[in-house]
Amino acid sequence: MHGGGGSSEGGKKRARIEIIPLIDVIFFLLATFVLFTLSLNKTGGLTVSLPTSETSIPRDTAGTVTLSVTSEGSIAWNKDLITLDEFLDRIQRYKLEEADPRVLINADERALFAQVVYVVDQVRIAQIPKIYIETRIFQSK
């Protein structure tokens, strides 16, 4: 009766389900799921403080190249900082290589308007008609 060896009177061991390892597995799966879902909404560009807009709509970034304009005026192709010459070369190559080229521009809200206009102009000069501007949704108080 005492000793708690897990055996019944017939000498057979009873099956025991250990809960602690199951909880560990569940927490691992939960953490993996959370990290995966957080990565779904990431943009391909640099992290910038986007301006707000009341007319923002969700975007599909599949097949787009992201051009970022930082508050200092730097340009990035996806997440790579590039020079103006590299930008002009890459935009021409992208137009030639991609059947349906699309460009997503995300500019810091403190970037000069002229810098953003320059990027838009160069994309239009490359004859890429699908240009999207990334913004944050305006939250009314």
Image (spheres, helix red, strand yellow):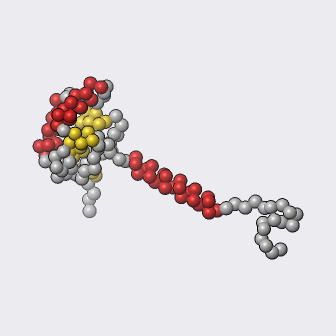
The image position of residue 109, as x and y in percent, is 19, 51
* Count of picture labels: 0
Task: Name which quarter of the figure residue 118 lies in.
Answer: top left
Note whether residue 18 is visible: yes
Work out which residue is located at the far bottom of the displayed protein and give it.
2
Q: Looking at the picture, does residue 26 appear above or below residue 88?
A: below
Note whether residue 124 is visible: no
The image position of residue 36, as x and y in percent, is 45, 49
- Which of 10 and 55 lies nearest the eye of the viewer? 10
Work out which residue is located at the far left of the displayed protein and give it.
114
Q: Is residue 121 left or right of residue 67?
A: left
The image position of residue 42, as x and y in percent, is 35, 47
Q: Is residue 2 left or right of residue 41?
A: right
Q: Looking at the picture, does residue 66 appear above or below residue 18?
A: above
At 62% from the left and 59% from the top, the residue drawn is: 21
At 83% from the left and 74% from the top, the residue drawn is: 1
Quarter of the figure with the C terminus:
bottom left
Task: Name which quarter of the figure residue 79 lies in.
Answer: top left
At 73% from the left and 61% from the top, the residue drawn is: 16
At 27% from the left and 41% from the top, the residue drawn is: 80
The image position of residue 114, as x and y in percent, is 11, 43
- Which of 85 and 23 lies nearest the eye of the viewer? 85
Work out which residue is located at the far right of the displayed protein and give it.
10
Q: Is residue 57 left or right of residue 51?
A: right
